[in-house]
Image (cartoon, rainbow, N blue to C red):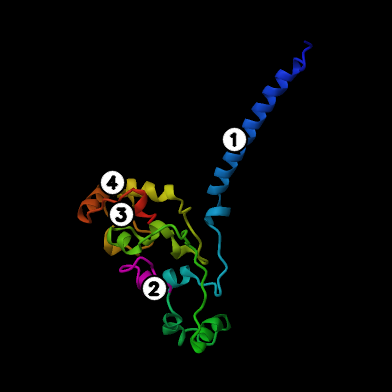
Amino acid sequence: MPQIFRRSANTLSKVSIFGLLSLVGGLIVLAIVLARSSYVTRQEIFVEQPLQFSHMHHVTDDGIDCRYCHTSVETSSFAGIPPTKTCMNCHAVLFANASFLEPVRASFRDNKPLHWTRVHDLPDFVYFNHSIHIKKGVGCETCHGRVDQMPLIYQQHSLLMEWCIDCHKNPAPNLRPRSEITTMGYRPAVDQSILGPQLMTEYNVNPPISCSTCHR
């Protein structure tokens, strides 16, 4: 019986299989790289807002504590977005006629809230509780970055699951006294390698790493 395929078919088949496996592997690598890119995570990307609120001005120049606006951060799972009345507590007097602040005045006048776009927006299948992190000594800066240096707010970290798990596995480097929770640019008075374990004991820090902790 004559040979159906030429000998070169063996080489062609091997090259085809190798090429197919390389293509599949390349697509997997591409998907992983894309999932970690800022295009997906939104890391360090400015978000358009109805009013370009400057944390740098309010925190650094005016010395306003995070909790003045984010009133529920110590007692609730969410930090809270301040109502327009909170803005008007100051701006009824300060820059009261500035055209830049007309959206704020209109919101207060018409009793219609400003629709801010969430910057640190976790997926719906992720549960995060602000209050427990505050109580355990995790500062605002640890997750949100140096907002006192951000004219426009952006997401400092990737917020990927591995980023959270790394901290849950080793929280000591990220702990600070509760009195310093909102301090930007915090530097411990003693070495963090000593302070961290002390605070873990004092605040009974033992973060769970099971899936049900965040995926409920």
How far apart are the alpha carbons under marks 4 and 2? 30 Å
On the image, the x and y values in percent for residue 124 come to 46, 60
The answer to whether 21 appears left or right of 145 in the picture is right
Q: Residues within 10 Å of mark 1 (few under 14, many from 20)?
A: few
Write the start and end of the magenta stretch as one range: 65-81
- SS type, badge 2: loop
Toward the left, the furthest residue is 202
Toward the bottom, the furthest residue is 109
- 118 to 210, vertically: above or below: below
Q: Quadrant of residue 181?
A: bottom left
Q: Residues within 10 Å of mark 3 (few under 14, many from 20)?
A: many
Which residue does the numbered mark 4 point to in the structure image? Answer: 193
The residue sitting at 48% across, 62% down in the picture is 121
Amino acid type at image mark 2: Ile
Toward the top, the furthest residue is 1
Q: Which mark is residue 25?
A: 1
Give the foreground label among 1 and 4.
1
Q: Residues within 10 Å of mark 2 (few under 14, many from 20)?
A: few
Does residue 74 show up magenta in the picture? yes
Q: Are marks 4 and 2 in contact (CB under 8 Å)?
A: no
Which residue does the numbered mark 3 point to in the structure image? Answer: 175
Q: Residues within 10 Å of mark 4 (few under 14, many from 20)?
A: few
